[in-house]
């Protein structure tokens, strides 16, 4: 009789759902985005420099074509 409450529990309150309200999924998504940025911070400068170099090389290759077409 002492543990009878385990078998006769109250029903869940109105409006409660089995799924989380969205905060957990947003928190996991934020962690998945922010964690690599914090962990790989020293390497991100090198990656950014590589992307800028690639963009500048593309601009140098396209510049003569742009001058010919537009200019």
Image (cartoon, rainbow, N blue to C red):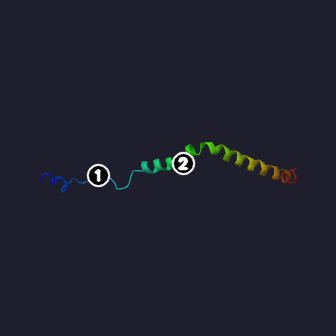
The tag earlier along the polypeptide, 2 or 1, is 1
Q: Secondary structure at mark 1?
A: loop
Q: Which residue is identified by label 2?
A: 33
Q: Is residue 25 left or right of residue 43?
A: left
Residue farthest to the left, as pictured: 1
Q: Is residue 5 left or right of residue 33?
A: left
**In the image, residue 42 above or below residue 70:** above
* Number of numbered callouts drawn: 2
The residue nearer to you, when weighing 18 against 46, is 46
Q: Quadrant of residue 44?
A: top right
Q: Which mark is residue 27?
A: none
The residue nearer to you, when weighing 21 against 9, is 9
Pinpoint residue 40: horizontal percent, then vertical percent.
59, 45
Pinpoint residue 16: horizontal percent, then vertical percent.
32, 52
Pinpoint residue 66: horizontal percent, then vertical percent.
83, 52
Q: Secondary structure at mark 2?
A: helix
What residue is shown at x 40% (from left), y 50% (from top)? 21
Q: Which residue is identified by label 1?
A: 14
The residue nearer to you, when weighing 52 against 65, is 52
What residue is shown at x 68% (from left), y 45% (from top)? 46
Crowding at mark 2 (Cα within 10 Å: few <14, some 14-19, many 20+): few
Q: CA distance from mark 2 to mark 1?
A: 35 Å
């Amino acid at each position: 009789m002492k543990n009878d409450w385990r078998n006769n529990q109250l029903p869940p309150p109105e409006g409660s759902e089995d799924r989380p309200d969205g905060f957990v999924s947003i928190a996991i998504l934020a962690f998945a985005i922010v964690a690599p940025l914090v962990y790989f911070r020293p390497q991100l400068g090198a990656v950014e420099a590589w992307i800028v170099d690639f963009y500048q090389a593309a601009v140098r290759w396209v510049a003569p074509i742009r001058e010919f077409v537009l200019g």
